[in-house]
Image (tube, rainbow, N blue to C red):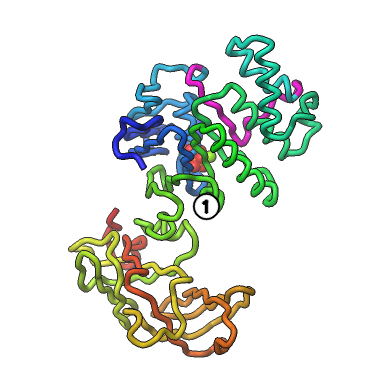
């Protein structure tokens, strides 16, 4: 990870963007990307991902802050001089040109010699296994092949930086998964710096060295996939990445590595204080379904509560139990399917437990009965 910004190849420094002069589509966006790194911007539709890529590519201008490429501000550099390869979801191939002509285009624009163009196009097509399709037009190829050609076109001039905006969005699931691995392999082999955009958390997890989770124009957290999953720092990230149970609590006590919150007037939950400070009243406690234990050994975990089973779903290697616990009627538990484990049936009262360290005390969910803002 980056320690200082001098080693950053791409840096967004407090970048903001408004299209209409009032709403901020991107707000105080700061992100450093190292050379050779694969960083994904992940977030729901409308959170500002495409706007960030467009500003970096030179198709839009920031209204605040600055973007640096290789240590230099890009503000005055025209889009085509930035040496960035782009694949946008709707940035289609030229339909009237063959695939080889499509790939030759960015090389011709850069004044590359005829011989070098022929070699470069062939190499790029082989790289995405489209060698035999050089003379086809886009309409004569499948969606997946067209998108591979678009990727080859973004790589053919050996850019230092490649931007991809939901490039697999139009493909079916199977093909999308194959292409994810292909993109990752290509990026690693070419050691090219990649900034990738998706709203699909699975895709972000598979591809990225680091993921920047965005919501409403702002970065929520930037971290490697496993850190986002295990150590979310905001409620938004805890919910957006994987599944989480949430219990809304009122803080009673807090220290450096333990806090206690009252939930549903009934239980006192012990948790790890991630984003709560002295003075906060409300918190959202989150626990991953696979970190919850059924009938824990007495004394082994700090949190043990009774729950009423609503539903049990058998999923082969694990069971998924839906239960009501401390007022949360959608509490989910994933239990490994182990031979000899007693049956759990709807209507049963069971004991569920979890460690204080597996329970993260985060910013409170949007205020319901109180006027307190969520600490951020
Ligand atoms: N050209 C534009 N003119 C006005 N508003 C825009 C324009 N492009 C995007 N927006 C707005 O900016 C916000 C962020 O959009 P966008 O960057 O496309 O998000 P994402 O790619 O995450 O879906 C949205 O509210 C969107 O409506
Ligand atoms: Mg977009």
The N terminus lies in quadrant: top left
* Left or right: where 206 falls relative to 272: right
Seen in the picture, residue 314 relative to 363 is either above or below; the reply is below
Residue at the location (32% across, 62% down)? 362
Q: Quadrant of residue 102?
A: top right
Q: What range is drawn magenta here?
A: 81-98
Residue 344 can be seen, yes or no: no
Q: Residues within 10 Å of mark 1 (few under 14, many from 20)?
A: some
Q: Label 1, on which residue?
A: 201
Of residues 37 and 93, the one drawn nearer to the viewer in this rendering: 37
Q: Is residue 374 magenta?
A: no
Of residues 242 and 135, the one drawn nearer to the viewer in this rendering: 135
- In the rendered image, residue 151, in percent from the top left (x then y), is placed at 63, 32
* Left or right: where 212 falls relative to 309: left
- In the rendered image, residue 271, in percent from the top left (x then y), is placed at 30, 70
Seen in the picture, residue 135 relative to 265 is either above or below; the reply is above
Residue at the location (34% across, 65% down)? 360
Residue at the location (35% across, 79% down)? 301
- In the rendered image, residue 220, in percent from the top left (x then y), is placed at 37, 49
């Amino acid at each position: 990870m980056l320690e200082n910004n001098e080693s950053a190849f791409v840096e967004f420094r407090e970048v903001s963007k408004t299209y209409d002069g009032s709403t901020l589509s991107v707000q105080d966006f700061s992100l450093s990307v190292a050379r050779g790194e694969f960083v994904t911007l992940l977030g729901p539709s409308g959170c500002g991902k495409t706007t960030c890529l467009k500003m970096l590519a030179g198709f839009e201008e920031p209204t605040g802050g600055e973007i640096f490429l290789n240590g230099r501000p890009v503000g005055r550099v025209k889009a085509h001089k930035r040496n960035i390869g782009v694949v946008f979801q709707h940035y289609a191939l030229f339909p009237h040109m063959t695939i080889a002509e499509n790939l030759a285009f960015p090389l011709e624009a850069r004044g590359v010699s005829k011989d070098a163009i022929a070699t470069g196009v062939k190499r790029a097509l082989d790289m995405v296994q489209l060698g035999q399709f050089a003379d086809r037009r886009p309409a004569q190829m499948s969606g997946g092949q067209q998108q591979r050609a678009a990727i080859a076109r973004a790589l053919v001039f050996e850019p230092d930086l490649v931007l991809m905006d939901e490039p697999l969005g139009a493909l079916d699931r199977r093909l999308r998964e194959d292409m994810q691995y292909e993109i990752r392999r290509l990026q690693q082999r070419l050691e090219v710096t990649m900034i990738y955009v998706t709203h699909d958390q699975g895709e972000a997890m598979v591809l990225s060295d680091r993921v920047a989770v965005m919501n409403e124009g702002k970065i929520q957290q930037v971290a490697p996939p496993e850190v986002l999953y295990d150590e979310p720092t905001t409620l938004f990230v805890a919910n957006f990445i994987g599944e989480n149970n949430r219990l809304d609590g009122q803080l009673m006590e807090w220290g450096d590595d333990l806090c206690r919150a009252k939930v549903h007037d009934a239980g006192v939950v012990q948790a790890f204080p991630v984003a709560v400070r002295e003075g906060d009243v409300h918190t959202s406690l989150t626990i991953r379904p696979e970190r919850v234990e059924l009938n824990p050994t007495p004394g082994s975990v700090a949190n043990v509560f009774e729950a009423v089973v609503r539903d049990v779903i058998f999923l082969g290697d694990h069971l998924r139990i839906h239960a009501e616990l401390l007022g949360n009627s959608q509490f989910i538990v994933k239990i490994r399917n182990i031979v000899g484990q007693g049956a759990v049936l709807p209507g049963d009262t069971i004991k569920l437990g979890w460690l204080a360290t597996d329970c993260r005390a985060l910013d409170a969910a949007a205020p319901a009965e109180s006027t307190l803002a969520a600490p951020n």
